[in-house]
């Protein structure tokens, strides 16, 4: 195996980051191209990307990469010249080639170049280069069929159907470690082994791809932002000098004369202004557009829609919305599950849709938007919506709830059932869905991010899943509350409202205190009890209830007093105290004391245990 | 267990000089390896952390870092005492994490040679965990119990701390 023998490491790094970026964009462009095949600008852009990759890799001597990109480029060139027309069959092959390129690039990135099986992919590209390529086009309406005859012409043995995916197979593992990768790939050659493998899987690997290639250890920052940051640091230094000066004056007893109070007041204001600016700036640097996650979805939607035989029009709105890196990393998985769900459970097949008087092609809208300190991501489909009866029946069948419970449930509570692990309305699990894992993943990840999930659904008209996520995880807005003298902080992102109530209005249901709040029955948790705080003051009739939501749950925390709203920096409690139920971390208040941050998510779980059944 | 007897590195060099920070706790004197002690501070305001073992006093703000505080008296099952002027928190490095221990008073740094360390008597009555006693130093005037605080939290407790 050739080792990476690149003298100039910097050159290599440059190549890798550039290629990675191009490849990420490429997927997106290719999908758009399929929709708008006449778009010459797009076509040229794709062509240029591949060309750039080819050029750079030949310069650096990555032969395999050159071979694949070269052929791909040829095919693209023919498309560009109009000698071929864009069909889904051709796109499949091109996408497969891009996958292979990604795999090769990730090999290079891992510093471990492997002898990959590239022949089969190239073999699929070759016939498209023949003059008679028109023939291929005719067959291409059924994509998996195209591939078979093509291979037979080449040196590949006819009994080797499965390798549309040498790339998919290996790429999944390549993230785990390079060692096991070597095995499955050569194994794909002997025809006998191959039969065991799954039949042609059209480009499925897209999900893991983006993650494999995207590099989270380095950040690209706009030079302008960096300059701004420098300016602000400069201002901060000035203010510091001013402070030192003031302190000196004070020490020398000149303070009175210089009107120290007023000066100090001014300084404090300026300092706080500069620091919050600085904070925003640094925060902005950590922000990346949500596009990074969104851009792999067109590809997923494309392949899913073909697997499912559904027609889907994916609309992406607000992909330029920025949010913190840490959040972006976490939302990828939940979104994939939600999209799969929408496509599998939500949208109907064209026939059913026509019968229901809807347009043949279903619409899936993925939107991201800022709202205050939150980002809201919604996945909306115009499918058949959630059938709450069916959900209820399934839950009863599985023994999760009783018949009476179901009849008493509000629609929201019924929707909440969807998040239970192992719950699925499907009778049989397919390779796409039905195991009841997806929504559980969604819930867990969103909870981890301190986010909220909301489901809106109208039967027959479609459903919408709304995720509310905090912009960042390091510094949060919080509500400080006092519980019998102890101060706790509650993330403001999960606070829905605060109310002052008379304790006599609390009701007791099965040992659980609840509050009737408008049309909702809110379970209450007394922080004093949960945290074993000693009673200090006399019991007063009035107390405050902070209504918090965690993922899809709502509850009320009973506190003695509200202190106020403050922006706090989250500090970990260290390994020894990492997993205290109900406590997410700590922060340091203005007076230097430590205040604990309440974790509404953990709280709900504790509540489930206590209230449960 | 073998190296528990030799708290400082250099297992076989018994003649090697080691430095210990000595502190008192309920009239007894204890010592810990000086290299493990990060700093010694007076009692600041401690924030109680709910739902933790009884000997976890809470957390403090140590120049912007949040450090958990353990009450040694409670941990060792000794009678509790009011904090006074002498009370100190010894901030120790516990395998990369800082942790503070409340002790009655910190007295001095002493040098002893490794050979002076005797194994602890087989049966130690009282609450001090056998596990974390690395040995006993018997000098003319004084008796010093050598502690290995990293051994202080038994496996169960560590799990309790982290696995809850």
Image: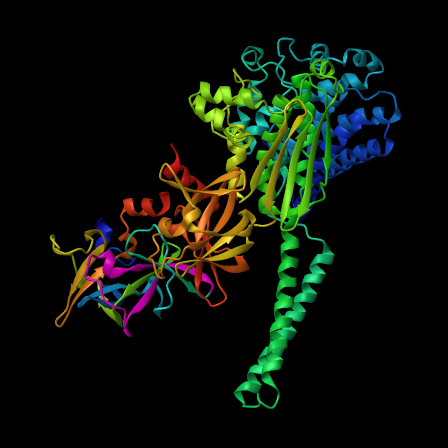
Residue A42: x and y, percent?
Answer: 82, 33
Q: Is residue A254 above or below residue A10?
A: below
Q: Is residue B43 left or right of residue A314?
A: left
Residue at image position (37%, 55%) is B49
Q: Is residue A420 above or below residue A481?
A: above
Residue at image position (17%, 61%) is B136
Along the viewing direction, whichever of A399 and B28 lies nearer the viewer = A399
How many numbered circles are shown? 0
Q: Is residue A439 left or right of residue A32?
A: left
Along the viewing direction, whichever of A108 and A612 lies nearer the viewer = A612
- State which quarter of the image contains the C terminus of chain A: top left
- Whether residue A128 appears in magenta in the rendering, the answer is no
Based on the displayed image, in which of its 4 quarters is residue A185 positioned?
Answer: top right
Residue A541: x and y, percent?
Answer: 41, 55
Q: Is residue B60 left or right of residue A271?
A: left
Residue reaching furthest front?
A504
- Would residue A101 be visible to someone looking at this image? no
Residue at image position (38%, 66%) is B45
Based on the displayed image, in which of its 4 quarters is residue A456 positioned?
Answer: top right
Based on the displayed image, in which of its 4 quarters is residue A234 positioned?
Answer: bottom right
Along the viewing direction, whichever of B125 and B113 lies nearer the viewer = B125
Q: Which residues are magenta?
A: B64-91
Q: Is residue B63 above or below residue A90?
A: below
Residue A334: x and y, percent?
Answer: 57, 34
Residue B88: x and y, percent?
Answer: 31, 69
- State which quarter of the image contains the N terminus of chain A: top right
Q: How is the image coloured?
A: rainbow
Q: Is residue A151 above or below residue A67?
A: above
- Would residue A404 be visible to someone looking at this image? yes
């Amino acid at each position: 195996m050739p080792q990476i023998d690149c003298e100039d490491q910097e050159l290599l790094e440059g190549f890798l980051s550039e290629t990675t970026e191009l490849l990420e964009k490429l997927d997106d462009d290719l999908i758009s191209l399929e929709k708008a095949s006449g778009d010459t600008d797009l076509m040229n852009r794709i062509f240029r990307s591949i060309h750039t990759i080819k050029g750079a890799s030949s310069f650096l001597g990555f032969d395999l990469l050159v071979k694949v990109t070269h052929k791909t480029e040829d095919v693209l060139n023919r498309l560009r010249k109009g000698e071929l027309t864009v069909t889904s069959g051709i796109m499949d092959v091109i996408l497969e080639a891009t996958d292979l390129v990604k795999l090769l690039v990730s090999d290079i990135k891992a510093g471990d170049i492997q002898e990959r099986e590239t022949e089969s992919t190239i073999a699929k590209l070759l016939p498209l280069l023949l003059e008679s390529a028109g023939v291929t086009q005719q067959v291409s309406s059924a994509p998996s069929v195209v591939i078979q005859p093509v291979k037979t012409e080449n040196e590949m043995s006819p009994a080797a159907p499965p390798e549309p995916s040498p790339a998919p197979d290996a790429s999944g593992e390549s993230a785990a470690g390079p060692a096991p990768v070597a095995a499955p790939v050569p194994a794909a050659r002997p025809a006998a082994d191959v039969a065991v493998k799954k039949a042609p899987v059209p480009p499925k690997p897209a999900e893991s791809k983006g993650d494999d290639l995207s590099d989270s250890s380095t950040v690209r920052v706009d030079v302008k932002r960096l300059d701004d940051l420098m300016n602000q640091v400069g201002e901060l230094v000035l203010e510091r000098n001013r402070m030192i000066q003031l302190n000196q004056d004070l020490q020398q007893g000149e303070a009175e004369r210089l009107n120290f109070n007023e000066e100090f007041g001014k300084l404090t204001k300026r300092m706080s202004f500069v620091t919050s600016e600085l904070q925003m700036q640094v925060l902005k640097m950590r922000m990346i557009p949500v596009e990074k996650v969104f851009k792999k979805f067109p590809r997923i939607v494309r392949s899913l829609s073909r697997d499912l035989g559904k027609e889907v029009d994916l609309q992406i709105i607000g992909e330029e919305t920025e949010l913190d890196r840490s959040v972006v990393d976490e939302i990828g998985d939940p979104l994939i599950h939600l999209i799969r769900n929408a496509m599998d459970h939500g949208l109907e097949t064209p026939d059913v849709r026509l019968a229901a008087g809807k347009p043949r092609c279903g619409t899936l809208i993925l939107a991201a938007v800022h709202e205050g300190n939150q980002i809201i991501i919604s996945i909306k489909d115009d499918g058949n919506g959630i059938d709450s009866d069916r959900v209820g029946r399934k839950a009863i069948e599985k023994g999760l709830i009783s018949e009476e419970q179901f009849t008493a449930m509000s629609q929201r509570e019924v929707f909440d059932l969807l998040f239970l692990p192992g719950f699925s309305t499907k009778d049989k699990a397919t390779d796409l869905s039905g195991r009841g894992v997806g929504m559980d993943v969604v819930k867990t990840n969103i909870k981890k991010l301190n986010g909220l999930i909301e489901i809106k659904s109208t039967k027959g008209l479609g459903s919408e899943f709304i995720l509310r996520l905090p912009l960042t995880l390091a510094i949060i807005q919080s509500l400080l509350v006092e519980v019998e003298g102890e101060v706790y902080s509650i993330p403001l992102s999960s606070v829905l409202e605060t109310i002052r109530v008379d304790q006599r209005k609390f009701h007791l249901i099965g040992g659980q205190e609840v509050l009737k709040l408008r049309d909702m029955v809110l379970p209450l948790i007394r922080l004093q009890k949960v945290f074993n705080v000693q009673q200090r003051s006399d019991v007063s009739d009035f107390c405050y209830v902070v209504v918090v939501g965690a993922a899809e749950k709502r509850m009320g925390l009973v506190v003695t007093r509200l202190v106020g709203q403050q922006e706090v920096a989250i500090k970990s409690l260290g390994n020894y105290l990492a997993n205290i139920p109900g406590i997410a971390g700590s922060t340091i208040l203005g007076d230097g004391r430590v205040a604990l941050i309440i974790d509404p998510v953990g709280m709900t779980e504790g509540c489930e245990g206590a209230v449960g059944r | 267990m073998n190296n528990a007897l030799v708290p400082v590195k250099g297992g076989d060099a018994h003649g090697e000089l080691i430095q210990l920070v000595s502190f008192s706790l309920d009239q007894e004197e204890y010592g810990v390896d000086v290299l493990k002690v990060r700093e010694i501070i007076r009692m600041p305001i401690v924030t109680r952390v709910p739902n933790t073992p009884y000997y976890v006093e809470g957390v403090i703000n140590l120049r912007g870092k949040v450090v958990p505080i353990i009450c040694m008296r409670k941990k060792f099952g000794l009678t509790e005492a009011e904090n006074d002027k002498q009370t100190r928190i010894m901030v120790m490095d516990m395998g990369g994490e800082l942790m503070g221990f409340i002790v009655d008073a910190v007295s001095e740094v002493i040098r002893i040679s490794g050979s002076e360390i005797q194994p602890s008597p087989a049966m130690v009555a009282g609450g001090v965990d056998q596990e974390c006693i690395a040995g006993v130093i018997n000098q003319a005037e004084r008796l010093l119990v050598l502690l290995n605080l990293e051994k202080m939290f038994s496996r169960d407790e560590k799990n309790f701390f982290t696995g809850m």
